[in-house]
Structure formats: C-alpha cells, structure tokens
Image (cartoon, rainbow, N blue to C red):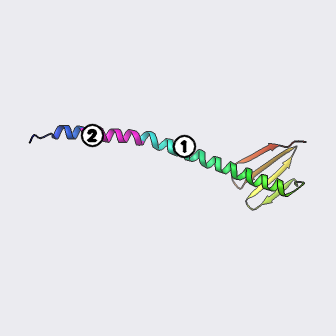
Amino acid sequence: MKKFNASVLLDSLFSFIMISILCITLIPLITLTNKTLQDQQNDLELKSVLLSQLIRTDTLPDITHLNYYVITRHNNKICIKKENNKTICYQQKS
C-alpha cells in the first residue's frame, strides 16, 4: 500500500479551515438573530400588557403601576415602560 500522509494532512487542514470559516461567520449571525428575537419578544410583551390594561379600564389615569410595568398618559400619548427597560409610546386618538 502507498502512504498518503501529505494528502491526508492537507485534507484535514482544509476541512479544519472550512469549519472554522463557517463557525466564524455563523456564530455572530446567530447571536444577532437571538438579540433581535429577544427585542421583539420584549416589545410584544409591553404591547400585550398595554392592550390588556386599555381593555380593562374605560379611563386610564395619568400614571398606572402594574407589577413591573409603568403606564403613563400625557399630551395624548400613552407610554409603557418595564423596569429598567425600553419604553414604547403611542399617540392617542382624540
């Protein structure tokens, strides 16, 4: 049998480089996608709480505290904020 040590070494080196390139390009993409998904889930959670509160009450006070959320109303704007998190505001129709 012939010995193919050099070609096996080159093939394994090529395979290692290809796997490294795939990992280097895919890991940041997956991380970015995960962060975007988390942001969308947080936005949806805030919108859900705001909608449920608006459905429950006929008139919303200027400031409402619900567990971890604060809903404020001023100048035809309704804003909701989770503790130490993003704020979402909507223009209120007259």
Q: Which mark is residue 13?
A: 2
Point out the tag, 2 or 1, that comes first from the N-terminus. 2
78 relative to 11 in the view: left or right: right
Circle 1: residue type: Leu
The span picked out in magenta is 11-23
- The label on residue 32 is 1
Q: Main secondary structure of the magenta part?
A: helix
Residue 50 percent location from the top left of the image: 78, 52
Q: How far apart in space, not on screen, are marks 2 and 1 (Cα)? A: 29 Å
The C terminus sits in image quarter? top right
For the point 21% across and 40% down, the residue is: 9
Tag 1: Cα neighbours inside 10 Å, few (<14), some, or many (≥20)?
A: few
Q: Is residue 51 left or right of residue 25?
A: right
**SS at badge 1:** helix
Q: Position of residue 36 (x, y in %)?
A: 60, 44
Q: Using a 10 Å C-alpha cutoff, classify the residue at mark 2 as few (fewer than 14 neighbours), some (14 to 19) or many (20 or more).
A: few
- Identify the element where label 2 is drawn: helix
Q: Quadrant of the N terminus?
A: top left
Amino acid residing under circle 2: Leu
